[in-house]
Image (cartoon, rainbow, N blue to C red):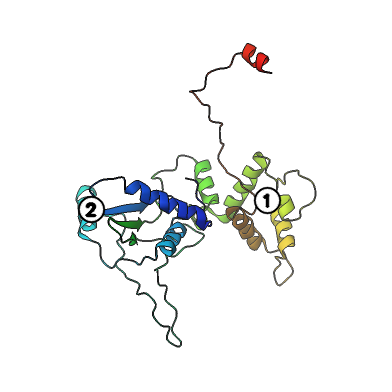
Amino acid sequence: MHTNARDQRTIENLLDRSIELVKQIPNVQTYKIFIVGMPNVGKSSIINVFKRISGSIRIRHPNQDQQNFLDDYKEKYGSLPFTLMDSYVEPVTRKKRGAKKKNAFGVCKTGAKAGVTRSIEQFIISKQNPRIMCLDSPGIMVPKLYSSNQALRLAVVGSLRDELVGEELIGEYLLWNLNQNEKTMYRKKYSLGVSNDAIESYETLLSGIARCIGGTSHQGALNRDRAAKKFLFDYRRGKLGSITLDELKPVVDSTASPISSTDATASS
């Protein structure tokens, strides 16, 4: 299902569909839904909507089934690639003067970078019979990146930390990729002229962005770093348009019957 972590309606549909699927499994007392994915793709944001919808709270200790799973995993692989969160958030009853407000649903920490979630968390999303639990996990990265092109694409969308690759290299690659695919909407976004011609120089782009957003230092010089961060931020937030970095090939329906040239001529 196509789901947007910022669109609660699509996440509600995802939750309803997930519950439908797990209930098709017979003779199970407790169902478990595991949220797994690449870093920084919106897993925690989706889970936070799950919690708001179901009014769930985190579980303090793993039940016996989960403990058995963890024990089996450690026996098979030697160690766990994660830690189990052992915490509980009490529902808010009354806010004391001067006290910080607690979150009644134990909202997952989110952030626009990889590696925010550091441990597995479990919570109940349905207390009815059968009970349904959901488990969150840290982002799982592929064990090996086979090309610099692959690594840079992951860095552009935030699945790799910027400091590991370098913001300048990420920004230069993003500009190159946009130009290769004739996606020059950044000119309109940053008021860089009416022409649709690509801007080949990354320095020229940063200078234009800095002037557009008023990014100047105390000495009046253009703030290059601020402009670079703005460029990446706007792409990741979709403010430069709906763009994918991958080359998408059209899907050919192998089951469709071929149409001969005579048939095409007759139908026209």
Left or right: 125 as drawn, with respect to 8: left
* Residue situated in front as seen by the camera: 158 or 109: 109
Residue 147 percent across, percent down from the top left? 49, 40
The tag on residue 202 is 1
**Residue that numbered label 2 is attached to:** 69
Q: What amino acid does circle 1 point to?
A: Tyr
Residue 9 percent across, percent down from the top left? 51, 55
Is residue 204 visible in the rendered image? The answer is no
Q: Assign a secondary structure to mark 2.
A: helix
Q: Residues within 10 Å of mark 1 (few under 14, many from 20)?
A: some
Residue 16 percent across, percent down from the top left? 41, 52
Q: Nearer the viewer, mark 2 or mark 1?
A: 2
Query: Total number of numbered labels?
Result: 2
Query: Which residue occupies 70% across, 72% down?
Result: 218
Report, in whole angstroms, how far the alpha carbon at label 2 lies from the one at label 1: 50 Å
Query: Which residue occupies 41% across, 83% down?
Result: 94
The tag on residue 138 is none
* Residue situated in front as seen by the camera: 88 or 113: 88
Judge whether 57 appears above or below 228 on screen.
below
Left or right: 109 as drawn, with respect to 33: right
Query: Which residue occupies 27% across, 57% down?
Result: 129
Is residue 151 visible in the rendered image? The answer is yes
Question: Outermost residue, front direction?
Answer: 129
